[in-house]
Image: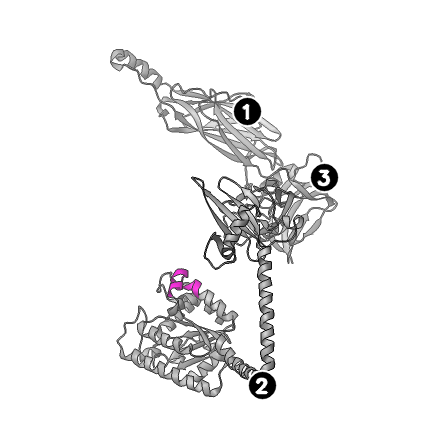
Amino acid sequence: MPVPWFLLSLALGRSPVVFSLERLVEPQDTAYCSPGLSCHLWDGDTLCLPGSIVPVPGPVLVPTHLQTELVLRCHQETDCGICVRVAVHLAVHGHWEEPEDEETLGGAADQELEEPRNASLQAQVVLSFQAYPTTRCVLLEVQVPAALVQPGQSVGSVVFDCFEAALGGEMRIWSYTQPRYQKELNLTQQLPDCRGLEVRNSIQSCWALPWLDVSTYGDDVRLVLNVSEEQRFGLSLYWNQVQGSPKPWWNRNLTGPQTITLNHTDLVPCLCIQVWPLEPDSVRTDICPFKEDPRAHRNLWHAARLRLLSPRSWRLEAPCSLHAEAGLCWQALGGGPCQPLVPLLPWENVTVNEAREFPLLKGHPNLCVQVRKVSSWEKLQLQECFWADSLGPLKDDVLLVETRRPHDSRSLCALEPSGCTSLPSRASTRAAHLGEQLLLDLQSGQCLQLWDDDLGALWACPMDKYIHKRWALVWLACLLFTAVLFLLLLLKKDHVKGWLRLLKQDVRSGAATTRGRATLLLYSADDAGFERLVGVLASALCQLPLRVAVDLWSRRELSAQGPLAWFHAQRLQTLQEGGMVVLLFSPGAVALCSEWLQDPAPAPGAHGPHDAFAASLSCVLPDFLQGRAPGRYVGACFDRLLHPDAVPALFRTVPVFSLPSQLPDFLGALQGPCARRPRRLGETVEQVSRALQQALDSCFQTPRAPGPGRTMGPEAGDQT
């Protein structure tokens, strides 16, 4: 069954949803105003001539705000049309002019000023309306009594009923006074189409309109046209591009009802649907339902292409507009990421389907164009090395970046994967070793200039000749070493056999020790004594073929990255290498686990800045809840400090060992298939057991101050 996804009969993008509109039965236009004001609508339309702005002679009325409302003007019950009611809010603008010499004029001036201040204000307000195919201008005369005239204050509004308009179009309204004292007000709005419920029943032109629903069916999208049989209609799918006119994609004249299936890979944000009955002067309905669909945005980037138009121009081609920026980068022959040429050539905003020029003197196979989302930390979206086809494959050239400064000073560096290496330099990179030769090549004209500007220049210098010389020396050394080795084998054949036998045994026995299995220790820092106990255990485990990671030894990285990021990186690396995550339970750790099981979102900052155990629970719990923990996690607690039964039941789905009493089983679980031989393992168990026992004794003999909400001591396990 299709799942309803976007009902076009209820909404249209930015258009208002119309459920019920006021009905007007007056066939003539009318005007009315706020209480206290008087207004009059002039008969017939007036000329739409705003004129020039003139100086304000004193207090005048000016429009300050436009407000619209949709109504229905009906000649009969089912013969209505959309009409736009406009309200113009008015205010007093300007001040009375004061006399220059009040003492000289005396009472006569006061009398002259008092008369206009006690008079009412009158204004002629023009409303201009445009909505294809209608253009009208009406004149409203408004009078405000003197009691309401306060400079800078609003006096009320005047309402005009109404401008008739076509369905689904765009309307523009202007308002100004005659004469005009300020810039005219303007308002642009989208009118609804036939999909409002009240509109559909009241406007005859909407009765024959095909009604369209969009639904998903698996990965596909279905367009369902719910129309009567034998009704003919037109259906168009087009790309509503911001630049230029809409680009048609699919057009058909059909007979209803119809169901059309679109593949999900065809969806893009600007894909719009237009449907209309095949009748004269029929109303067309447009909808763009995929603007916010994540699949459509992914498909848009997959469909985008970079195309080389000429040796110095290119274009980003896509069916819809993209908020993207582009820049040049240098792709080295040995692989690795393409390095942006910033700040000399910074990222620039790019417009889809618009030709752009390269700021280059010459092309090069290693020069590429990168395109990415604007203000995005996400990975690169597009990259194309345009000149690889015309100029051949990538070359083993090094790019020299020349930076120019005031007073004719300049600096040179070689762009390498590790960064831009200054020349000359004593760094241990290839360009640094050949720095003097590269500078000589640049001075002798053997390097190709790719870009030149007041800020600097770019040069591509070949490295082939240096690579050939180096390989010749390497081959010569290899041949010489092979000859000497062959001679030694002939002279001491029996001794060589013995050496090989011993080497083979050492490799077999020491390979696991050299490599070691990754182990990540997670614990709750209850107090300093418990941290010392964890440190002793971690140091003891390092004597085994184990590579131990614990936050005690990574405080600097923990502070820089944060506990959650540090744990996530360590956990991912440990599990990818087939290692083991060890959960060291203490009373504080048990309390934290109980908090998370009751409320998975504790308040931020509730734990210490280095408490990786508290931060890691958000990643550890899903593994236990989803059954992925066995084989990847083990639990452990210390004798006399916590009983294994005190560990929450969820975490007992993996083995939980009590140390040092169950140390052999614990070490065997950590080492897995790479475990040592029994004799060596027994020696290690004795050493680790003694170290842990001494640390435990010291932990209980030294007075400790537990952290907030945590209890330390032999009796702690009984409280859980």
- Residue 137 numbered mark, or none: 1
**Farthest bottom residue in view:** 679
Check disc 2: other Cα within 10 Å, few if <14, some if 14-19, many if 20+: few
* Amino acid type, residue under disc 2 in the picture: Asp
- How many labels, in total? 3
N-term mark: 3 or 2: 3
Question: Does the image show residue 69?
Answer: yes
**Farthest left residue in view:** 103
In-image side of 206 versus 700 (left or right): right
Residue 621 higher or lower than 189, as above or below? below
Question: Does the image show residue 292?
Answer: no
Image spot of residue 585 (x, y percent): 39, 75
Q: Nearer the viewer, residue 433 or 540?
A: 433
Residue shown at 56%/30% (left/top)?
163
Residue range of the region highlighted in magenta in the rendering: 555-566
Residue shown at 59%/62% (left/top)?
471
- Residue 278 numbered mark, or none: 3
* Amino acid type, residue under disc 1 in the picture: Cys
Residue bearing the label numbered 2: 494
Residue 597 higher or lower than 69, as above or below? below
N-term mark: 3 or 1: 1
N-term mark: 1 or 2: 1
Q: CA distance from mark 1 to mark 2?
A: 113 Å
At mark 3, the secondary structure is loop
* Amino acid type, residue under disc 3 in the picture: Leu
Residue shown at 52%/47% (left/top)?
374
Would you say the residues marked 3 and 2 are in contact, meaning their CB atoms lie under 8 Å apart? Answer: no
